[in-house]
């Protein structure tokens, strides 16, 4: 079945970097854009950025422009999200989500990766 | 950046009642790029409605979306116990920015 499976929970120190993976299966990887969304404890959803798995192009929310990168490995149908200079406010659940096509919203979500940043 | 404002913040209703959730955009969404998601505790969001009024695959027909421009509504008829959750609207008109509303908590009265 169509699914996105993310890497496991992480605990990071203040100032460290984070890399979360998201492995796609059950569909043609390069045909659908993938997004990263995060959710701080008890808070709402925050869009971080998008990657086109086909060509690798990316675009990020302004808030994360200087700290985030997104890459993909087409051989393993996996996308990666890197976030640097971590601070306590980055403590959150990070989700990858597939965009189902123009106008179609985010139709498939990963299970989420809990990231805790400690000082 | 388009800001989405959801109301009410919390809605208390009983099973069997109708829920009406509002999402207002700070600018007109020219292509009705508006989606609704349901999120239960400890779970990832689930897509309910896309393009303002189209139900996603597997979503019961008691869920419906309407609206255009700046005002959008999610209606849930005949609330079931499993419908009590947090609901988010999301715009994807000003691509590539995909902002979410702050959420409406639908709780059992």
Image (cartoon, rainbow, N blue to C red):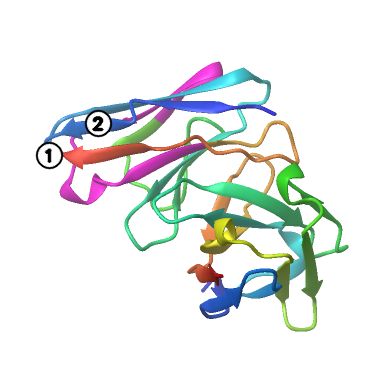
- Camera-side mark, 1 or 2: 2
Circle 1 is placed at which residue position? B15
Q: Which residue occupies 51% across, 74% down?
A: A1
User: Which quadrant of the figure contains the C terminus of chain A?
Assistant: bottom right
Say if residue B31 shows up in the picture.
yes
> Is residue B73 on the magenta stretch?
yes
The secondary element bearing badge 2 is classed as strand
Q: Which residue occupies 71% across, 52% down?
A: A49
CA separation in Å, label 1 and label 2 = 12 Å
The answer to whether the residues at label 1 and label 2 have Cβ atoms under 8 Å apart is: no
Q: Which residue occupies 44% across, 54% down?
A: B45
Circle 2 is placed at which residue position? B11
The percent position of residue B64, horizontal first and vertical second, equals 37, 32
Please say if A99 is above or below B51.
below
The secondary element bearing badge 1 is classed as loop
Indicate which disc residue A78 carries: none
Q: Main secondary structure of the magenta part?
A: strand
Residue at the extreme front? A119
Disc 1 crowd, CA 10 A, few/some/many (<14, 14-19, 20+): some
Left or right of B105: which side holds A38?
Answer: right
Left or right of B105: which side holds B18?
Answer: left
Q: Which residues are magenta?
A: B65-89
Left or right of A88: which side holds A21?
Answer: right
The percent position of residue B83, horizontal first and vertical second, equals 25, 46
Q: Nearer the viewer, residue A64 or A101?
A: A64
Say if residue B77 shows up in the picture.
no
Q: Quadrant of residue A78?
A: bottom right
Disc 2 crowd, CA 10 A, few/some/many (<14, 14-19, 20+): some
Q: Nearer the viewer, residue B49 or B107?
A: B107
Q: How many marks?
A: 2
């Amino acid at each position: 079945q169509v699914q996105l499976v993310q890497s496991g929970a992480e605990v990071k120190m203040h100032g460290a970097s984070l890399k979360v993976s998201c492995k796609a299966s059950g569909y043609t990887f390069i045909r659908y854009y993938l997004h990263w969304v995060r959710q701080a404890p008890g808070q709402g959803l925050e869009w971080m950025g998008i990657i086109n798995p086909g060509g690798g192009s990316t675009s990020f929310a302004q808030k994360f422009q200087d700290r985030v990168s997104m890459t993909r490995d087409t051989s393993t149908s996996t996308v990666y999200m890197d976030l640097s200079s971590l601070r306590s406010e980055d403590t959150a659940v990070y989700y990858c989500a597939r965009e189902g096509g123009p106008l179609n919203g985010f139709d498939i979500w990963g299970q989420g990766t809990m990231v805790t940043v400690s000082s | 950046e388009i800001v989405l404002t959801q109301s009410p913040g919390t809605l208390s209703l009983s099973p069997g009642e109708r829920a009406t959730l509002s999402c207002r955009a700070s600018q007109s969404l020219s292509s009705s790029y508006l989606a609704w998601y349901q999120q239960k505790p400890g779970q990832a969001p689930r897509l309910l409605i896309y393009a303002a009024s189209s139900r996603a695959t597997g979503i019961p027909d008691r869920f419906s979306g309407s609206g255009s421009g700046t005002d959008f509504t999610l209606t849930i008829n005949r609330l079931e116990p499993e419908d009590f959750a947090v609901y988010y609207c999301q715009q994807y008109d000003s691509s590539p920015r995909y902002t979410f509303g702050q959420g409406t908590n639908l709780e059992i009265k």
